[in-house]
Structures are given as structure tokens and as C-alpha cells.
Image: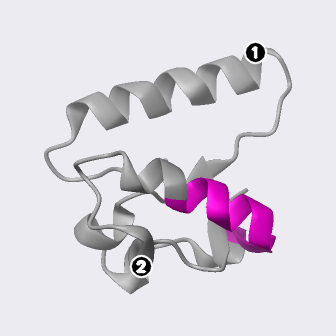
Amino acid sequence: MLVLPDQPDHDAVGLVAEAVCRDYNLRLVRYLCAAWEWLAPEDVPWNHARQFALSDKVRARKNAAVANAAAFPGPEWVADRELFLV
């Protein structure tokens, strides 16, 4: 599990997600939402990273969602692809 400094709520959710996936034999996929703020590149398990391109439609929907959230800087925050850990 990736452990983020001073993020006990994130750690708790991660532990529960791992347990549920293990109990039900499901694949756990992690989204690196704000990991770039908390982790150094060498802390990311790159051998588990998978990149997925976003279609124009999905990117437009994500831009609209980000525009409604005060925590995000705006549509320029949304890239044309996403990175997940599998």
C-alpha cells in the first residue's frame, strides 16, 4: 500500500479497499489523485502504473466536474490521460 504522510483518512480507506478486494478476489485499482503533492517520483511503484487515454467526451465531462469543485484550480488541471496503479 502507498502510505501518504499525515493522511490517516486516506490510509484507512486504502486499507479497507485492499481488504474488500482481497476478500472478494477483486483487482484493486488506485487513482493517484493528489499523490504528486505527497510523493516523490521514486516512491511510486511504476511497475504497477497503467496509463489510459481519455476520450474528448470523458475529458469534457471531467473538466465540467472540476470546474464545480473549489479544491481544483480549473480545467487546465485535467490532462488528456489518467494514471492508475493496478
Q: Where is residue 44 in the image (x, y as percent from the top left)?
A: 48, 73
The reply, left or right, for residue 23 in relation to residue 66 is: right
How dense is the environment of label 2, judged by Cα within 10 Å: few (below 14), some, or many (20 and up)? few
Magenta-drawn segment: 48-63
Q: Position of residue 4 (x, y in %)?
A: 28, 52
Q: Quadrant of residue 41?
A: bottom left
Task: Check if mark 1's residue and mark 2's residue have beta carbons within 8 Å.
Answer: no
**In the current view of this chain or complex, which residue is farthest to the bottom?**
41
- Element type at mark 2: helix
Front residue (pair 25, 59)? 59
| Badge number at residue 76 | 2
Q: In this view, does 55 lie above or below 15?
A: below
Q: Earlier in the sequence, mark 1 or mark 2?
A: 1
Q: Name the residue under label 1.
A: 23
The answer to whether residue 2 shows anywhere in this view is no
User: Between marks 1 and 2, how big is the CA–CA gap?
Assistant: 39 Å
**Image quadrant containing the C terminus:** bottom right
